[in-house]
Amino acid sequence: MDTRRQLKIGSVIREVFTDYLLREGKHIYGNALVTVTNVKVTPDLTIARFYLSIYNTREPDVVLQKFEEHTFEIKRALAAKLRHELRRIPEIEFYRDDTLDQVFHLENVFKKIKEEDARISALREAHEVNQEKKAPNKK
């Protein structure tokens, strides 16, 4: 459970980082669509973990690698903006947030299950109708 201070600092860092991405991030991630889903700060406030959703690219891990290569530049830009709010700028780590990908995958799985269920129900009904036609009428 994050403390109020961790949440506040994570929120401030996320806001500044998002602004940085909008203004200057294109040279890092190119044509990919990158969104910052979360920034978590460790309890000792020395590490900030950035969770990024990366879309519109075939290789999101390559984009994540580019962020890791530009860590020093990003930290320097954050330090320039946050120097009056934080004493020390935390070290930066980047992680890929594929939660939305998992949601889409699960939706597809549930859709296939529903379609299979409908197909099985239709086959069962057709089988029951055939059984009724074959059975002699008892009156």
Image: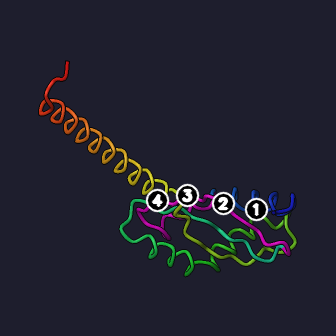
**Which amino acid type corresponds to the residue marked 1 in the rendered image?**
Gly
Callout count: 4
Q: CA distance from mark 2 to mark 4?
A: 16 Å
In this rendering, the label closer to the viewer, 3 or 4? 4
Element under disc 3: strand
Residue 21 counted in the magenta span: yes
Counting residues from the N terminus, which is met first, the one under dot 1 or under dot 3?
A: 1
Q: Label for residue 10?
A: 1
Q: Residue at x 76, y 58 (%)?
A: 12
Mark 4 — residue?
A: 101
Q: CA distance from mark 4 to mark 1?
A: 24 Å
Counting residues from the N terminus, which is met first, the one under dot 2 or under dot 4?
A: 2
**Which amino acid type corresponds to the residue marked 4 in the rendered image?**
Asp
Q: Magenta region: which residues?
A: 19-44
Nearest the eye: 35 or 120: 120
**Which amino acid type corresponds to the residue marked 2 in the rendered image?**
Asn
Please tell me whether residue 40 is drawn above or below residue 128 in the rendered image. Answer: below
4 and 1 marks in contact (CB < 8 Å): no
Q: Label for residue 35?
A: 3
Mark 2 — residue?
A: 38
Q: CA distance from mark 1 to mark 3?
A: 15 Å
